[in-house]
Each structure stands twice: as structure tokens, then as C-alpha cells.
Amino acid sequence: MNLKRIPQDLKVSRCHHVSLEVADVETSLIFYRDFLGMKLSERHKAGENKNIPFEMAFLRLHAQHHDLVLTHDPERKYTKKTNKKSPAGIHHFAFECLDRKSFLFYLSRAKQMNLTIVRGPVVHSSFHPEGDGTWGENESFYVLDPDEHRIEIFCDMATISDSGDYVNAYGSPVPETRAEEV
Ligand SMILES: [Fe+2]
């Protein structure tokens, strides 16, 4: 397929909300509210709109209507993610902290809430002295939500210049790194 390169000014701006299927909307709502400070924009019962046979809750972080949607199908029997026999799905999704201070805030909050931290905190870097040899330069930790969806909380992801060079969040070039495509 001979597709044209997308002009920068027309490119979609970001990966945005995730709609998660959850076993219990109320439980997940409490989790995302308590852990991340999300606020409920609106919540609807299954069938309230004739096109939507799901229970839905729209949660926001800042001004936009939703960053996360919790969806529950009353016809479906949910199993934990640890059940290995399931269709392909989301491995994890991520919330960005604006700086490391915010990241550390969430890390202590996760501990305070006794959340299961399944990985980290870890620096995804081959360059950083404490890096784990993986990719992105971001510092991350991972927790499980009530349905065992894996959530990443991170800060300090590298940016990639127009020429493909990596620059870490503190403005330093990252040696021996280069984007595959520019
Ligand atoms: Fe990630």
C-alpha cells in the first residue's frame, strides 16, 4: 500500500482515552477516584440509551469530558485477567505525570493504598545509571486495578527530534539511541 506521509499539522494529537471493561463499575470508580483523583463526568445505566446495552461511567482528570471510560456488560460473565484463556486484549495503559515529583507522589499513594505494584519503580533506560536496559527513558511503576488491568504510571519519557535523536526529559542527548523511523 502506497500511503502518503501524514502532514505534521494534520496528525492526530495524542493517544487519548481507554474504555475498559470492568466487572463492577462502582468498585472501579472508587479505585480510579481514590488513586488518581479522577472525577465522574457522567454515569449511565445499561440500556438508558437504546444503542448502548452497557453500563458506562465517564471519568476525567482535568477539563476534558473523559480520559477513561468504564464499561460493564450485564450479559457478560467476567473473569480475572490471570485466566490465560482469553481473547487478545490490552497489555497495559499509562498515565503520564508531568514531573518526577508527581510520579513519586503517585508511588507513595499506591503504597499507601496497598495496591499491588507488579513492576517497578523502574527506569526504562540503557543510559541512566539505574536503568533496566529497556526503552523510552521513562521512570515507571505498574499497578493492577480491581479487574487486574495493568496500569503504568510514568514520568520523564524521552522525546525524539525530527532527526530521530533521543533527548531525555532533562535535555541531555541519550547516547546510542535513534528512532527507527523519522
Ligand atoms: Fe508502557
Image (cartoon, rainbow, N blue to C red):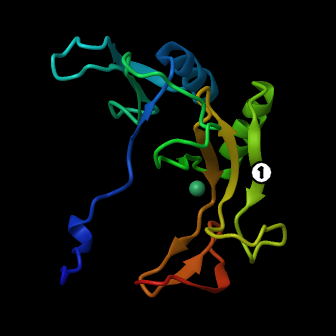
| Distance from mark 1 CB to nearest ligand 1 atom below 8 Å | no
Identify whether 12 is placed above or below 150: below
Q: Quadrant of the N terminus?
A: bottom left
Residue under the image location 69 percent in, 70 percent down? 134
Q: Nearer the viewer, residue 154 or 148?
A: 148
**Is residue 109 rendered to the left or right of residue 11?**
right
Point out the residue furthest to the left here: 50
Q: Which residue is mark 1?
A: 121
Residue 70: where, in percent of width, then height? Answer: 42, 26
Identify whether 10 is placed above or below 164: above
**Is residue 56 rendered to the left or right of residue 156?**
left
Residue under the image location 62 percent in, 34 percent down? 148
Which quadrant of the figure has residue 123? bottom right
Point out the residue furthest to the right here: 129
**Is residue 96 rendered to the left or right of residue 5?**
right
Residue under the image location 31 percent in, 20 percent down? 54
Q: Residues within 10 Å of mark 1 (few under 14, many from 20)?
A: some
Which quadrant of the figure has residue 9? bottom left
Identify whether 69 is placed above or below 161: above
Q: Amino acid at mark 1?
A: Pro
Q: Nearer the viewer, residue 109 or 143?
A: 143
Residue under the image location 75 percent in, 77 percent down? 127
Residue 140: where, in percent of width, then height? Answer: 69, 53
Indicate which quadrant contains ligand 1.
bottom right
